[in-house]
Amino acid sequence: MAKRKRSRGALLEGVPVSEPPVRPGLVGPRRVVPRHIQRPVYARTGDPGPPISAPVRTPDEVVAMRRAGQLAAEVLLFAGKLVKPGIHTDQIDARVHEKIVRRGAYPSPLNYRGFPKSVCTSVNEVICHGIPDSRPLADGDIINIDVTVYIDGVHGDTSVTFEVGEVDEHSQMLVRETRNAMYAGIQAVRPGAPVHAIGRAIERHAQAHQLGVVRDFIGHGVGTEFHSSLQIPHYYDRRHATLLADAMTFTIEPMLTLGTPDMYLWDDEWTAVTTDQRRSAQFEHTLLCVYADQGAAGSGAEILTRTPAGEGAAEVYAR
Ligand code: MF3
Ligand code: CO
Ligand code: CO
């Protein structure tokens, strides 16, 4: 008889549920965007309409995407400095909103399908799409801050999971290996590779560290639309056989969990949490698929969500 795989139950021994559970706080009023700032189509009604944009960018759009990506990266670096015990997630939203509009950009989440705030803040067992509210960060929390900006007609989308003060060892491992899983996915990008090569690399990394891979949310084409029709799962699925091509722009944004990757939504219809209350982490970059040249170490991905100096919050805040 084949050796039985160790059951998930045994693996989870000693992995704590996150206590106390995250609960909904008070959500403040919608923030105002100055009139002179160019708005995405959904800004007024909340409705982005059906996705219609191409998966590949024009040369002009590539130039704009570099700028949007750099701005998103700068805002995320700034957001990381705010992460301290005691700050309310809505205070992070306020500072991030202000920074984005000062730079002449629109905070993409604001009113996207009715989302009420300018950034997503997802704490502990919240997988993604947490709404900034009156909850103060506590020592030992982990928080994903997901920044998307719209400028020059395109979006740049990036996120990092930050540690608040001293976090437990399981959370440290979760954060570190989720970052590594994102980079494993990025390494799989090159023109001609199937989309499922990305998910395969991420899933393999997650399995090696006994982490769950969330299936309910996936990476996406991004450009003139916040979410285009291109889908990038973070798990292997051979049906996702679309070939990556030069000038495609999309995100890789794996959400990995200490326990089950299954989720439910809060009554706010946004906040996604793990069903077992164990923690989840996420990292996200916006990528441009390019032909690998000398020095690109074989990867055919240009990471758009970095500063001109090549800095990103994922590295700057790594412990
Ligand atoms: N930034 C998220 C992503 O990575 C999307 C947030 S949608 C929002 O795709 F409405 F919650 F902002
Ligand atoms: Co995204
Ligand atoms: Co995002």
Image (cartoon, rainbow, N blue to C red):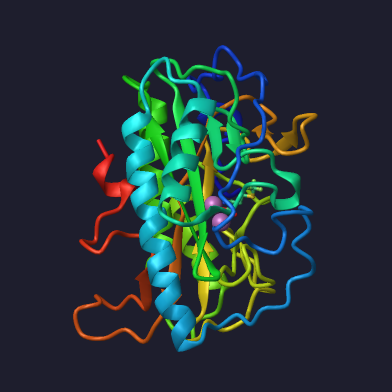
Q: Nearer the viewer, residue 81 or 44?
A: 44
Is residue 304 left or right of 46 when viewed as pictured?
left
Left or right of 264? Residue 292 is left
193 is higher (above) or lower (below) than 118: below
Left or right of residue 233: residue 16: left
Q: Quadrant of the C terminus?
A: top left
Asked whether residue 242 is in view, the answer is: yes
As drawn, the residue found furthest toward the front would be 35
- Residue 253 visible in rendering: no
In which quadrant of the rendered view does residue 173 lie? top left
Q: Give the residue drawn at x 62%, y 39%.
A: 117
Q: Is residue 190 above or below residue 147?
A: below
* Residue located at (27% from left, 48% from top): 315
Measured as percent of width and height from the top left, residue 238 is found at: 65, 73
Point out residue 66 in the picture as x, y percentages from the top left corner.
38, 70
Tally of numbered discs: 0
Residue at 50% across / 21% down in the picture? 88
Residue 258, x across and y down, in percent: 52, 33
In the image as oriented, which residue stretches furthest toward the top?
A: 20
Tell me if residue 132 comes above or below residue 206 in the rendering: above
The residue located at (36%, 61%) in the rendering is 70
Q: Position of residue 205 (x, y in %)?
A: 43, 53
Along the line of sight, the residue nearer the viewer: 156 or 104: 104
